[in-house]
């Protein structure tokens, strides 16, 4: 029986993994790479847990799936029914229960397509029977322990659960390992305690491989080890809510959402990761009016002046996307099958790309080795969600956008368009013949192809050619 075992090392940094491999600290992973393959891939924007799981499980981007961040605001819904549960969201907390139902209905998850599936510590469980979600009762407990107290038992617990069902009649195992991400936020992503978790993972990986081999499952199993985003250490917090307040905005934000019972707002800030944010603006406290950047130019200029702010993106009245940074300004036009890119003043990403139409794949190829891999395609996809901000902000390395109400304090962050957050390792126990750079979106089609399942999902990913 063919099996796909998907191990998601949430928040694992490609560079640290590489360093530890070089020091021979990850012997079991090294063996897998020697027999199989190790590629550097790119994740999606926002490069944060939750939205960045969408490509693996649905084959689409967070934008089309309508999940543009771990927090979002829906201007249209808020203007009509502000007390409706769908007018704003934070998946950090009790609103996490809406995760599955918030994903656009037309996208089926792998759990809906592959009936014999197992999920461990995963946010997206759409399509799973209760018995197949092995952490349906314990997830919150372990996650809180890990998030607030830096407990690392969540990963050993995940492997224990996986080992228990390894011989059972299942095709697909989606197993999330949260330890590295949690401890990175609390202590810094290059802390010795975090490096220790990479080693612990390697020990468990050794056990997993020996169990698969002992039970004659190894040859028919596709093992995928990857991550959903990287991390960079945070030196300074630039509280975006405080910034907006300081220039006179009435701001709607988490956790103080109950203010909507007695207050009107002309701004909302929704942070993810915490190195990206959606900013929503209106005039005269009216959320139903269409956004016009020309009425918010002062706000934009003040925003761009901050060292913490790297890239900002918004739509102009012609519905073209404008990207700005201290380095320059460019236009992005989504032309259905192609994307038109036009640097206006220098280039906001310091790319060396001339004006013209490009396919999404060509844009990845041209940008994969830059500081902003795949940023043009990623900005196009995120604006496909009507829950995205009027202005989307991506932070400079070393900064994040949330200080108040973030406990414990984040010493490392992710979510931005920067290479350090977007680059992820993709390790398979099989060789692949690949002539294109890999996106996490390609994993979905690869899993389906290996297990011989089909889908009607409108997936833009390409399958990897497994040898
Ligand atoms: Zn995180």
Image: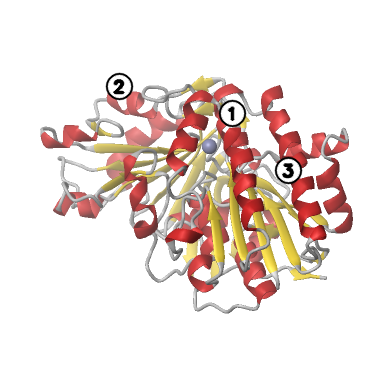
Q: Nearer the viewer, residue 136 or 95?
A: 136
Q: Nearer the viewer, residue 466 or 41?
A: 466
Residue identified by numbered label 2: 246
Res. 191 in view: no
For the C terminus, give its image quadrant: bottom right
In the image, what residue occupies the spot 29% across and 34% down? 253
Q: Which mark is residue 183?
A: 1
In the image, what residue occupies the spot 49% across and 74% down? 457
Q: Looking at the image, is mark 2 or mark 1 nearer the viewer?
A: 1
Relative placement, left or right, of 458 versus 206 is left
Q: Does the residue at mark 3 contact the one at mark 2 (Cβ under 8 Å)? A: no
Q: Which color scheme is applied?
A: secondary structure
Res. 70 in view: yes
Crowding at dot 2, Cα within 10 Å, few <14 / some 14-19 / many 20+, comes out as few
Tell me the distance, in whole angstroms, between the alpha carbons under discs 2 and 1: 32 Å
Residue identified by numbered label 3: 204
> Disc 3 or 2, which lies upstream in sequence?
3
């Amino acid at each position: 029986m063919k099996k796909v075992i998907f191990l998601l090392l949430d928040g694992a940094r490609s560079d640290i993994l590489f360093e530890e491999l070089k020091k021979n600290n990850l012997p079991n992973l090294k063996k897998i790479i020697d027999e199989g393959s190790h590629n550097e891939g790119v994740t999606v924007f926002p490069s944060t847990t939750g939205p960045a799981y969408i490509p693996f499980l649905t084959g689409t981007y967070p934008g089309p799936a309508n999940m543009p961040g771990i927090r979002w605001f829906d201007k249209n819904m808020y203007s009509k029914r502000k007390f409706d549960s769908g007018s704003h969201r934070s998946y950090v907390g009790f609103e996490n229960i809406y995760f599955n139902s918030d994903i656009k209905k037309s996208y089926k998850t792998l759990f809906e397509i592959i009936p014999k599936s197992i999920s461990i510590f995963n946010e997206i469980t759409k399509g799973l029977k209760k018995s197949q979600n092995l952490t349906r009762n314990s997830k919150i407990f372990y996650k809180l322990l890990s998030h607030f107290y830096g407990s690392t038992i969540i990963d050993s617990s995940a492997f224990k659960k996986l080992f228990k069902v390894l011989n059972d009649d299942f095709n697909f195992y989606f197993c999330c390992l949260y330890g590295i991400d949690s401890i990175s936020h609390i202590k810094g992503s290059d802390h010795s305690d975090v490096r220790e978790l990479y080693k612990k993972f390697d020990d468990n990986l050794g056990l997993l491989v020996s169990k698969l081999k002992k039970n004659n499952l190894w040859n028919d199993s596709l093992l995928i080890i990857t991550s959903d985003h990287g991390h960079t250490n945070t030196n300074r917090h630039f509280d975006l809510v405080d910034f907006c307040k300081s220039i006179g905005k009435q701001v709607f934000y988490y956790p103080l959402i109950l203010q909507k019972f007695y207050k009107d707002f002309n701004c909302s800030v929704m942070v993810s990761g915490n190195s990206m944010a959606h900013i929503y603006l209106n005039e005269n406290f009216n959320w139903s009016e269409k956004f016009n950047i020309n009425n918010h130019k002062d706000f934009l200029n003040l925003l761009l002046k901050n060292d913490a702010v790297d890239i900002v993106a918004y739509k102009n009245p012609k519905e073209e996307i404008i990207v700005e940074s201290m380095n320059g300004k460019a236009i992005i036009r989504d032309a259905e099958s192609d994307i038109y890119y036009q640097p206006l003043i220098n280039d906001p990403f310091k790319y060396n790309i001339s004006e013209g139409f490009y396919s999404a794949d060509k844009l990845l190829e041209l940008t994969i080795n830059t500081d902003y891999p795949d940023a043009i395609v990623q900005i196009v996809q995120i604006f496909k969600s009507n829950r995205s901000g009027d202005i989307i902000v991506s932070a400079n390395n070393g900064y994040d956008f949330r200080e108040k109400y973030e406990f414990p304090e984040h010493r490392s962050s992710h979510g931005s368009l920067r290479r350090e957050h977007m680059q992820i390792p993709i390790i398979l126990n099989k060789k692949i013949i690949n002539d294109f750079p890999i996106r996490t979106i390609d994993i979905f089609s690869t899993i389906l192809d290996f297990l011989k399942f089909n889908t009607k999902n409108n997936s833009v990913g390409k399958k990897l050619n497994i040898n």
